Amino acid sequence: MKLALFSLVVLCAVPLVGALSTPPMGCNGYYNFGPNVTEADVRKAIDNAKTNGLTALGWKYILIDDGWQATNRDAGGHLQGDPNYFPSGMAAIAGYAHTNGFNIGIYTEPREFTSDSGVYTPRWLPGSLGHLEQDAADFAAWGFDFVKFDIPGNIPDSERAYWDNRFVAALRAATNKVIAVYTGGFNDMDPSTPSVLWLWRSTGDTQGANGFELWANFLYRLDRATRHPETVGPGHFSCLDYSLAAHPNTNIGKSSVGMISIITAPLWTSLFFRPQDYPTHWNNLTNTDIIAVHQDPWCIQGQPILSNATGQVWLKPLSDGRKAVGLLNRTTNSSSTLSFNWADIGFPSNTTAVVRDCWRQTNCYATGSFTSTVPAMSAMIVTVSTNQPRIGRIAIVSANVQIDFTAGAGDQASDFTLVSAATVSGMYANAGGSFTALGGGAFRATVPLSGARQFYRIKR
């Protein structure tokens, strides 16, 4: 894997506008095991994801990286799984993934031997040079959903599109499934890339064991992955390799996941494989506010809109009218005070808005602007909404007043309070009662019917 630039071709049984239309959230054990991942490891990772509730949150992709191959093709020239690593065969592990609700990927390169051969493993692992069409047919027959097509680093930019298009053509000839491709390492983006690729790597590899790279390296990859926002959209995503969700610096761990969500890039992690080693890091993968920003169906790649000497403000418009904002402190040793005005993000200047801290999942009100002090090597992710609750049906049911209303799609029942007063202009006080989410941004407030006339207001 190292020192190579890669592509990922996807053979997907679901329509491109479905599961593949938003960036994947998944796992790859390379940064745990290198080219030595086994069938047992992959099964355990899938089981860990289900046990820890990740599958239900959308973490449904798993990639078998380099090292799965037997050192020799069979008599018919077909790749085989190494019997010491995948004794049940590659079709069996693909079937296990599908049974458990996962899309599963496999790895190859357009050269005789893969880049790990003789370097990160003593085994010499066959690549697909001279066998592209045959291997594409085998990957499809085994049931794999996508293929990481790792283009060697010494292949010039001008030739990468050739290999991508050729492999895509081979896959299309091999199966009637929808095809997408994940490629990477472009120094200069080929304008045709998004038309044939699902994902493309726009940076080199994450640097450091288990992804414990320096903050500066992560920022470098972040900047390179966001050079061409016009190429990103539903079904087409720029990838900066692994997230740093398991990083021992908790600020870096959270911030990498948060900023990857702002830029709508794939979220890859190795945490599924060894959850016992990272007991405090699972929260980096399970925050529903962050996932909602990442999976927004508009799939806009966030971009920096403001900057100062220590940090940046990044903006990602969301499909429900909210704005996701990343306050990124790029320094390694000092806090950064970052602010933005409503006009900077496309809201009226005199509006009172709800600002939600995504990691803490708490709300505050602000008018006209927002300012926060962000620790070193950190990113604060907030959403800003000017949507006010809109009252719909009001009814009396079983001695209760029911008030149905709609609010922002990102709101939760716990965000609201019901207040009441005896007159319209009177002093409003907490009326108690309860709130229930009805789905799709709709809510219901229920409060016992009082014996006197009451005026109610809903406060966010």
Image (cartoon, rainbow, N blue to C red):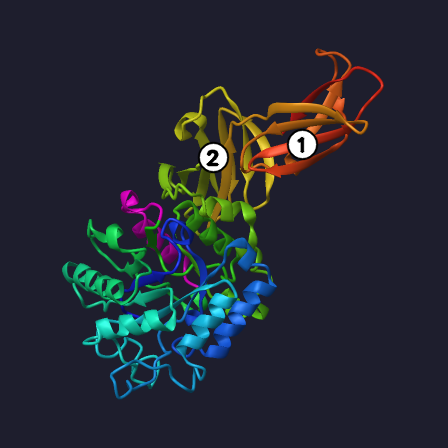
Secondary structure mostly taken by the magenta-highlighted segment of the chain: helix
Look at the image and tell me in which quarter the C terminus lies.
top right
Q: In this picture, is 373 found above or below 92? A: above
How far across and how far down the image is residue 212, in percent?
45, 64
Q: Residues within 10 Å of mark 2 (few under 14, many from 20)?
A: some
Residue 177, visible in the rendered structure: yes
Q: In this picture, is 12 found above or below 107? A: above
Q: Nearer the viewer, mark 2 or mark 1?
A: 1
Q: Nearer the viewer, residue 321 or 251?
A: 321
Quadrant in the rendering for residue 221: bottom left
Cα–Cα gap, marks 2 and 1: 20 Å
Q: Earlier in the sequence, mark 2 or mark 1?
A: 2
How far across and how far down the image is residue 449, in percent?
80, 24
Q: In this picture, is 101 found above or below 446? A: below
Quadrant in the rendering for residue 203: bottom left
Magenta includes 160? no
Quadrant in the rendering for residue 397: top right
Q: Which residue is mark 2?
A: 320
Residue at 45% from the left image edge and 47% from the top image edge: 295
Residue at 31% from the left image edge and 59% from the top image edge: 179
Q: Residues within 10 Å of mark 1 (few under 14, many from 20)?
A: many
Q: Which residue is mark 1?
A: 444
Residue at 78% from the left image edge and 14% from the top image edge: 422
Q: In this picture, is 370 found above or below 117? A: above
Tell me the SS state at disc 2.
loop
Question: Where are the magenta residues, as a range?
Answer: 212-234
Q: Residue furthest bottom?
A: 75
Q: Nearer the viewer, residue 242 or 113?
A: 113
